Image (cartoon, rainbow, N blue to C red):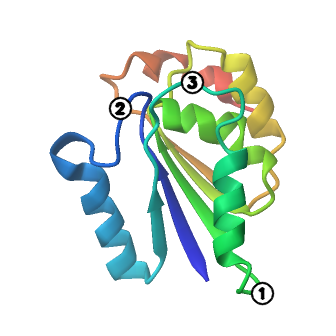
Amino acid sequence: MEYKLVIPGQNSGIYGYENCYLKLSKKLNKENGAAVIITSNPFQMDDPISDLMYVINKYAERFNEYQLFYIGFSKGANIGAQFATLENKFSRLVLINGPLMINYHKTKNGLQQFKGEKISFVYVCLDPSYKYVELIAY
């Protein structure tokens, strides 16, 4: 079984601008047959992944094997780099416009510990972190 986890930016809900997260989720489900989980990201937590992983693992325990693909936007990208990299169930991460000027050392440390298949970074030139991308090269 394949799951896609979508984490928006801080203080964002599950909808996003013009329902972009819901549209993305529907497309991922239709094209890949994957179960898609979207969670809001209302505040800063010490460990935003543990409770979420508990719920996912309880739901998915009926499957022998499953993969998690993580898609994070802005602060959700930082959460992926800093915490999802510590979970062995995540095989791929897509991190979009994560703010690198905030605790970039935590982001880099998390990335260095990733044991999954692949991490993809997406930055647009209008994002303020675009000029800091070299900080996460490892």
User: Between tags 2 and 3, which lies in front?
Assistant: 3
Within the image, what quadrant is residue 115 found in?
bottom right
**Percent x, y of residue 131:** 47, 16
**Percent x, y of residue 76:** 51, 37
**104, above or below 35, in the image:** above
Q: Answer few, some or many: residues within 10 Å of disc 1's Cα (few below 14, many 20 plus, some between 14 and 19).
A: few
**96, above or below 54, in the image:** above
What is the three-letter code of the residue carrying label 3? Gln
Q: Which residue is drawn at 74% across and 79% down?
A: 61
* Quarter of the picture holding the N terminus: bottom right
Instruction: Evaluate if marks 1 and 3 touch, with contact meaning CB atoms under 8 Å apart.
Output: no
Towards the viewer: 110 or 8: 8
* Quarter of the picture holding the C terminus: top right
Label annotation for residue 110:
none
Q: Residue at x 69, y 56 (%)?
A: 53
**Percent x, y of residue 88:** 81, 59
Q: What element carries label 2?
A: loop
Label annotation for residue 44:
3
User: Between tags 1 and 2, which lies in front?
Assistant: 1
Say if residue 91 shows up in the picture.
no
Instruction: Evaluate if marks 2 and 3 touch, with contact meaning CB atoms under 8 Å apart.
Output: no
User: What residue did someone put label 2 on?
Assistant: 124
CA gap, disc 1 and disc 2? 38 Å
Q: Which residue is drawn at 27% across and 48% down?
A: 15
Sequence-first tag of 1 and 3: 3
User: What residue did someone put label 1 on?
Assistant: 64
Sequence-first tag of 1 and 2: 1
Give the total number of marks visible in the rendering.
3
What is the three-letter code of the residue carrying label 1? Asn
